[in-house]
Amino acid sequence: MFDISWIDLTILVLASFRLTHLIVFDEITSFLRDPFFTVTYETDPSGQLVKHIQFKDSGVRRWIGLLLSCHWCVGIWAGTAVIILYRNVPAAFPLLLILAVAGAAAVIETKTYGG
């Protein structure tokens, strides 16, 4: 296969994590999700916030909506993109590093303040 150091692997994992979160959850990328589904929130009787996803249309549009609403699904593609960039576009390494640092910061933030 190819030789990879533990630090590069850590960077790739964190970059993939952050890219996945960016696509699936972050408000800044809502323009990617808006054509495919709408998200609403409702408080249930126990006081918990419940997320409801309403997909727009059917067929391919629904399929893309299902994909973009699933962090496991997007994670596969984000991981693939990160590895392709790492292996084939050396100039993209600073971007991967920025994503990794942001991913690590997100993990620390969640552990510190509970997200």
Image: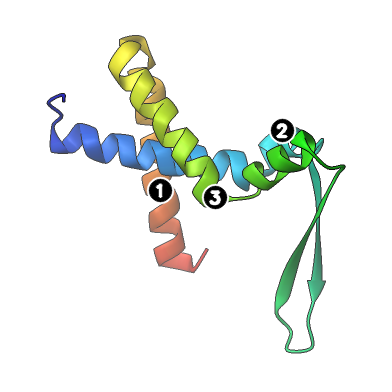
- Residue 9 image point, x, y percent: 23, 36
- Disc 2 to disc 3, C-alpha distance: 14 Å
Element type at marker 1?
helix
Is 82 above or below relative to 59? Answer: above
- Marks 2 and 1 in Cβ contact (< 8 Å): no
What residue type is disc 3 on? His
**Mark 1 against mark 3, which lies toward the viewer?**
3
Q: Residue furthest right?
A: 57
Give the left or right position of residue 8, taking residue 12 as reference.
Answer: left
Element type at marker 3?
helix
The residue shown at (69%, 43%) is 27
Residue 102 visible in rendering: no
Q: Sequence-wise, which precedes: disc 2 or disc 3?
A: 2
The residue shown at (32%, 12%) is 88
- Disc 1 to disc 3, C-alpha distance: 19 Å
Q: Residues within 10 Å of mark 1 (few under 14, many from 20)?
A: some
- Residue 78 image point, x, y percent: 47, 34
How many numbered marks are there? 3
Residue linked to disc 3: 71
- Marks 2 and 3 in Cβ contact (< 8 Å): no
Q: Sequence-wise, which precedes: disc 2 or disc 1?
A: 2
Q: Residues within 10 Å of mark 3 (few under 14, many from 20)?
A: some
- Residue 32 is marked as 2
Where residue 86 sits, quadrant-wise, is top left
- Disc 2 to disc 1, C-alpha distance: 24 Å
What residue type is disc 2 on? Leu
What residue type is disc 1 on? Ala
Pick the residue in front: 44 or 59: 59
Give the left or right position of residue 111, taking residue 72 as reference.
Answer: left
- Residue 105 is marked as 1
Q: Quadrant of the N terminus?
A: top left
